[in-house]
Image: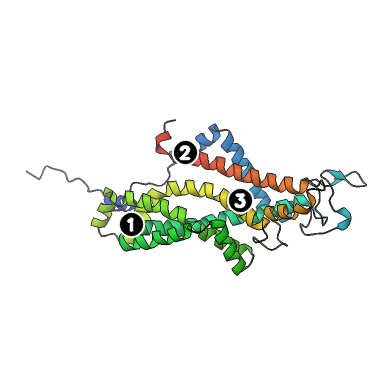
């Protein structure tokens, strides 16, 4: 009876089970993302502004017209677009109280602000996502310890806690990135924990356990891809908040050393000359901060809508 029945090959479900329900982005997903981005107006403009800021940050020494720390008291407080004796505009955005070129300082300031923003988000995202997945997957005492640590950190005002730590560690780009990164982990941990609790009882996780997969492999290969989308959305908005925090701390003199130009530092240096009519000292770095944060928020809105499965058909 069984001789005429052809044996069907058994599919290798182990790899699919270990990967969970999330697959690698296909070409159709990339095409859908490109179509959605090209069909939107504001995200394209936001992406263009961020690309300009990124070029300024990466190629700052090449495109900067002058050394940002070069002082010339003869050229102090020159207004924007002031021409020299030859009729050439020497300082398109003017100079500060020490004769330093505002354009050059703004270009170099993009390097610090963007580097601090993205580096802090990477540190906070990796730390928070890891702890959140561990807490949600194991539960019990592990979950209680991690969440109580999060509650303790939330009990302190973030800016006050950051100031206290920077006063102890001292100003510096590395210390600023470390403090801002560690200060952001709670948000990622809570999101990752909630998503992990919803995923850990799914069929593909149970199937992965049944074939002998280790806990670490299940968390990395099965659960993490399925909780990644909301974490990406949080990160896209969090970069903007970290840039604002860096500008605030630099404005207070706690961010980076005064010799390192930052947008917040330029704003802080303009305080003594604003009443004298030197409006350009605060306007141009303020515009740079506003455009960067606004572009990140607009792009974050688009990422949230694109990753929302309820809006796939729109």
Vertical placement of residue 175 versus 55, above or below: below
| Mark-to-mark CA distance, 1 and 2 | 27 Å
Image quadrant in which the C terminus is located: top left
- Figure quadrant of the N terminus: top left
The residue lying furthest to the right in this view is 85
Provide residue 80's location: percent of width, then percent of height.
81, 44
Question: Can you tell which quarter of the image residue 246 is in?
Answer: bottom right
Calculate the distance from the C-alpha at mark 3 to the C-alpha at mark 2. Answer: 25 Å
Disc 3 crowd, CA 10 A, few/some/many (<14, 14-19, 20+): many
Looking at this view, name the residue that lies furthest to the bottom. Answer: 168
Residue beneath label 1, please? 137
Picture residue at 45% right of the left edge, 49% below the top? 231
Disc 3 versus disc 1: distance between alpha carbons? 34 Å
Question: Residue at position x 52%, y 43% from top?
Answer: 300
- The answer to whether one can see residue 58 in this image is no
Q: Which residue is mark 3?
A: 244
Q: Report whether 139 appears left or right of 114.
A: left
Helix, strand or loop under label 2: helix
Give the secondary structure at mark 1: helix
Q: Earlier in the sequence, mark 1 or mark 2?
A: 1
Is 297 situated left or right of 67 in this image? Answer: left
Write down the residue under mark 2: 306
Q: Residue 131: horizontal and vertical position, in percent?
A: 41, 59
- Give the number of the mark in front: 1 or 2: 1
Q: Earlier in the sequence, mark 3 or mark 2?
A: 3
């Amino acid at each position: 009876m069984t001789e005429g029945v052809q044996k069907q090959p058994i599919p290798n479900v182990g790899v699919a089970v270990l990967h969970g329900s999330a697959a690698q982005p296909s070409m159709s997903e990339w095409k859908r993302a490109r179509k959605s981005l090209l069909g939107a107006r504001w995200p394209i403009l936001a992406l263009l502004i961020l690309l300009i800021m990124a070029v300024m940050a990466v190629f700052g020494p090449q495109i900067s017209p002058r050394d940002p720390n070069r002082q010339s008291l003869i050229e102090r407080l020159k207004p924007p677009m002031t021409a020299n004796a030859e009729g050439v505009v020497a300082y398109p955005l003017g100079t500060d109280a020490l004769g330093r070129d505002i354009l050059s300082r703004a270009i170099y300031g993009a390097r610090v602000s963007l580097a601090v923003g993205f580096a802090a988000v990477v540190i906070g995202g990796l730390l928070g996502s890891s702890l959140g997945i561990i807490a949600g997957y194991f539960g019990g005492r592990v979950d209680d310890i991690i969440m109580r640590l999060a509650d303790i950190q939330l009990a302190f005002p973030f800016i006050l806690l950051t100031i206290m730590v920077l006063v102890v560690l001292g100003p510096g780009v590395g210390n600023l990135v470390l403090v801002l990164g560690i200060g952001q982990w709670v948000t990622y941990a809570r999101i990752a924990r909630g998503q992990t609790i919803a995923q850990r009882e799914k069929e593909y996780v149970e199937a992965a356990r049944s074939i002998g997969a280790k806990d670490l492999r299940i968390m990395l290969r099965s659960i993490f891809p399925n909780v990644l989308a909301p974490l990406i959305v949080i990160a896209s908005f969090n970069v903007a908040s970290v840039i604002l925090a860096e500008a605030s701390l630099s404005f207070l003199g706690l961010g980076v050393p005064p010799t390192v130009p930052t947008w917040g530092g330029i704003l802080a240096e303009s305080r003594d000359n604003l009443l004298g009519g030197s409006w350009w000292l605060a306007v141009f770095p303020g515009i740079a901060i506003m455009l960067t944060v606004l572009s990140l928020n607009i792009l974050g809105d688009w990422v949230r809508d694109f990753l929302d499965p309820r809006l796939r058909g729109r």
